[in-house]
Amino acid sequence: MALPKPKLSFWQIFNMNVGFLGIQYSFGLQQSAINPIFLFLGASEELLPILNIAGPVTGLIVQPIIGAISDKTWSPKWGRRKPFFLIGALMGSICLFLFPLSPALWFAVGLLWLLDVGNNMAMEPYRAFVGDKLPDQQMSLGYQMQSLFVGAGILMANASIFLFQDWFGGGEELTGSVPKWLYYSFFIGSFLSLATILWSVLKTPEIPPDPEELAEINRHKALPFMERLKVPFIEIGHAVREMPKFMWKLSGVYLFQWYALFIYWQFITPLFRSTMGFDTSEAAAQAAKMSTTYNIVTAVVALVLVPLTLRFGGKKVYALSLFGTAIALFSIPYITDPVYVLFPMVLFGIGWASMMGIPYSMVSKIVPQDRRGVYMGILNMMIVIPMGIETLSFGAIFTNFLGSDSVNAMLFAGAFFVIAGALALRLNVQKAKAEVAAEMGH
């Protein structure tokens, strides 16, 4: 039986999550700079959803497999989760450095696939890493600390985009080439991706497995190579079949939440070209200001949500934040002032802080320790499957039902957030914990 986990200090929890800053800076560039680069290199707006399919596909494949493998990994020197987010960070660092140097659209699309593999390889074990280290009573703080770094990382990425454009931009936009001002954002990301992960790796020891876990890991190591290759897929299959009902309910929330978020990220730049008459550079800079605003809010409110969640319950705070995000998306298309349009992002930022912390804390409290990695991977599948559905379906919806109008796309996303909020009210952690405990008792 696993020993009780020691409580960690605030700064120990802070240090173990610093690596999330680099991962999320990279994610911030994907939100705000990748699609403009595709547009600079000659992509049409209708192509944007399918060009972004790399994220959903790599997340669907990489995260659950890495989660299952890391559950069965232990090295006295490197630990359980650390080797995976080190390799992922190195891959991400190289891809970010090369991205603005893309000579053609096909090259940038290929790099996005590799970047997503690296980011997924780093992020999945990181979610499990926090659950491995923290006792239940500190789980909310641990995941909301990750939410803080989500806000800070994406904030830095987006601030760099419009600041570097302001300092080094100007001149005529040329189709087929990436503006020089975008280079600097990616080069900073390349450095942060590796440096922040190294900080957390060096500052945070992993908890060794208990004798029972270690025996299972050694049994796995003794298997022939081909048998070991099959184990992650078998583990994923077993985990899905035995998945708590709570996670199935959460998958309904995630279907509408992440479908809507992918629409927002893809169409916020085209929206500003439409509603404000901006060119691509100006629209990308305005989109970056939007993202900067909501991530400032996320970084500020992330830790405030911890006592609110403890007092009112995770599902109420989560559902209310999703309704607030819907209000933000309903408002944005009708505000044509570049300053006033930033105000709805306060609601969006509260929603983003909630989305990046509360569901992970809920799931970590429910799932068994020896399957935390694979269940965090499955939780990510619940993110990327809606994104994949969006990339394959929304191009046709946009053209045939929404009149190829980015205003209608944003309203469509808002409606999906209303549905997600309603479904979130059905989540019940205490009931789910009791159900899982009863099943394990049998």
Image (cartoon, grey):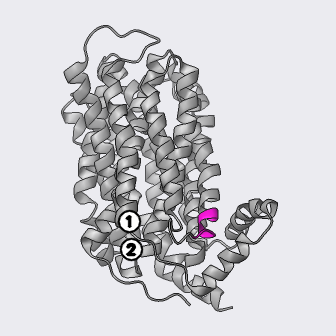
Residue 241 appears in which quarter of the rendering?
A: bottom right
Residue 260 in sight from this viewpoint? no
Nearer-the-camera pick, 426 or 201:
201
Asked if residue 123 is positioned above or below residue 159 in the image, the reply reads below
Q: Secondary structure at mark 1?
A: helix
Q: Are marks 2 and 1 in contact (CB under 8 Å)?
A: yes
| Residue 423 within the magenta-colored segment of the rendering | no
Q: Position of residue 70 (x, y in %)?
A: 59, 64
* Residue assigned mark 1: 143
Span of residues in magenta: 68-74
| Quadrant that contains the N terminus | bottom right
Q: CA distance from mark 2 to mark 1?
A: 6 Å
Residue 160 appears in which quarter of the rendering?
A: top left
Q: Position of residue 144 (x, y in %)?
A: 33, 64
Q: Residues within 10 Å of mark 2 (few under 14, many from 20)?
A: many
Residue drawn at (48%, 53%), measured in percent from left and top? 86
Residue 302 appears in which quarter of the rendering?
A: bottom left
Residue drawn at (40%, 57%), measured in percent from left and top? 356
Q: Position of residue 328 (x, y in %)?
A: 32, 44
Q: Amino acid at mark 1?
A: Tyr
* Residue assigned mark 2: 139
Q: Residues within 10 Å of mark 1 (few under 14, many from 20)?
A: many
